[in-house]
Structures are given as structure tokens and as C-alpha cells.
Image: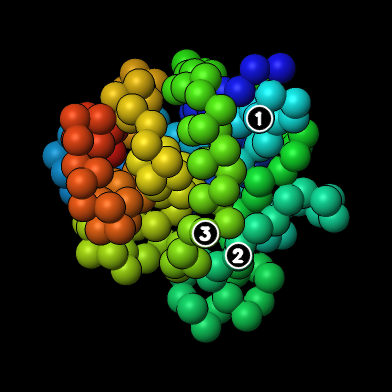
Amino acid sequence: MTSFVDLYWLPLGADGNRLVAFSGRVYKAFAARFQHRVACGLYHSALIAGDGSDSYVIEMGPAWGRHEPDRGVVATGPVGLAVLGRSRLFRYEVRCWKNGILPDIAKAVSSPQRLSTSPILARRVMHLTARVPELTWGRDQLHAGDQWNSNSLVSWLLAASGHNLSRAVIPEHGRAPGWAAGLALASSQHPSGHDIGVRAAKQIAQS
């Protein structure tokens, strides 16, 4: 197996979670009306990275969504409000799951997008996964004009690890809420990261 980092775009609620799908539809309709534009499909992103021998599924999801004891949880954080995070129902988890499962991969759109085959970049992504700040899902604590969520994790990992984000292309007529929040975090930690790739990636959140 070669080293690689692949990006997957998954329609919101593709895993069968009706609450997520319903919330996504409400958000999509409200955002389109507020911004005076046509409603776009919403996407959740995830990564699969290979280190030459094994692959790792990297994503952020509800803490109650999966039950495998060896699913590679490396971080957790609250959903909505910090105080609510005391309950597992209001917590998310970041997973770097060795030879893991991306359950809705069959429904991925315009995927996979291979962003690199560099062993160094693949290792950086996996190393950084456990270092993501445990910000509150659904809040704009970075004042980026965008809420922290699963897309924020992915964009932060890619930007912080040095990937060329101009290769990350959202499916046509789609949006990735949260993407800009991850880029804001990466640029605040690494000001020099405002290169062409990062600027191009911001278009994903604004398209």
C-alpha cells in the first residue's frame, strides 16, 4: 500500500441519521433565504490516510454514533454549549481509526479526491488529529464567521499539515459549512499558511 491522503464528501445525513438530515434541511433552507441564494446540498467531509501498510479513517462525529471499542478516538468535545458536554448525548469525538469504517462511503459524491501521496504529509495528518483543539461544535469561538464542526476538523488538518487545498473541490452545487473555521484556526497558528492553496480552499465554504 502506498502512502496517501484521500478526501471524501458525504451528503449530510447519508448515514441514516434522521435528526442530522432534518437539521441539515432546516439549516440549508434558512441559510439560503438569509443569504438570498438558491439552497445548496450540504456535505460532511472525512479523510482516509494510508501510511504504507495500514489505512486510517479520520472524521468527527457524535460520541453516541458508534460503539466499537477500538474505533480510534483521540479527542472529544462538547456540542452546542460547553456545559452540555457533560452528557454523552452532547459530545462529539474525533477518530483516527486504524483500518476503520467509513459507514456511508458508498454514498460519497465526487470522491475520493486524492490530495497527496507523500508519506510525510500522511504522517502529519495522523499526528495532528490528536492535537485538534476541543472547540464547541456549532459555535463560532474563533470569530471566523463560521461554526466549528466536522468540516472544520478536516480543513484544519489539511491546512496545518501543508496540503495544497486547491485540490479539495466540493461537489457541484454543494456547500461545506464549517470549512472556513478550520482554515481560520490553521492560519492563526501558522500565519504564513495564507498561501494560494488556503485562499482557494476558502472558496469551498463560500460557494
Q: Quadrant of the C terminus?
A: top left
- Residue type at mark 1? Asp
Q: Is residue 26 left or right of residue 3?
A: left
Measured from the top left, where is residue 121 in percent x and y? 49, 33
Q: Earlier in the sequence, mark 1 or mark 2?
A: 1
Which residue sits furthest left?
36
Q: Residues within 10 Å of mark 3 (few under 14, many from 20)?
A: few
Q: Secondary structure at mark 2?
A: strand
- Residue type at mark 2? Thr
The residue singled out by tag 1 in the image is 51
Q: CA distance from mark 3 to mark 1?
A: 19 Å
For the point 64% across and 28% down, the residue is 50
Measured from the top left, where is residue 190 in percent x and y? 28, 52
Tally of numbered discs: 3
For the point 52% across and 41% down, the residue is 125
Which residue sits furthest front?
120
- Residue type at mark 3? Arg
For the point 58% across and 75% down, the residue is 85
- For the residue pair 148 and 20, the one nearer the viewer reads as 148
Q: Is residue 31 above or below residue 108?
A: below
- Given this view, does label 3 or label 2 mark the residue nearer the observer? 3
Q: Secondary structure at mark 1?
A: strand
The residue singled out by tag 2 in the image is 76
Q: CA distance from mark 1 to mark 2?
A: 24 Å
The residue singled out by tag 3 in the image is 131
Q: Is residue 73 above or below residue 192?
A: below
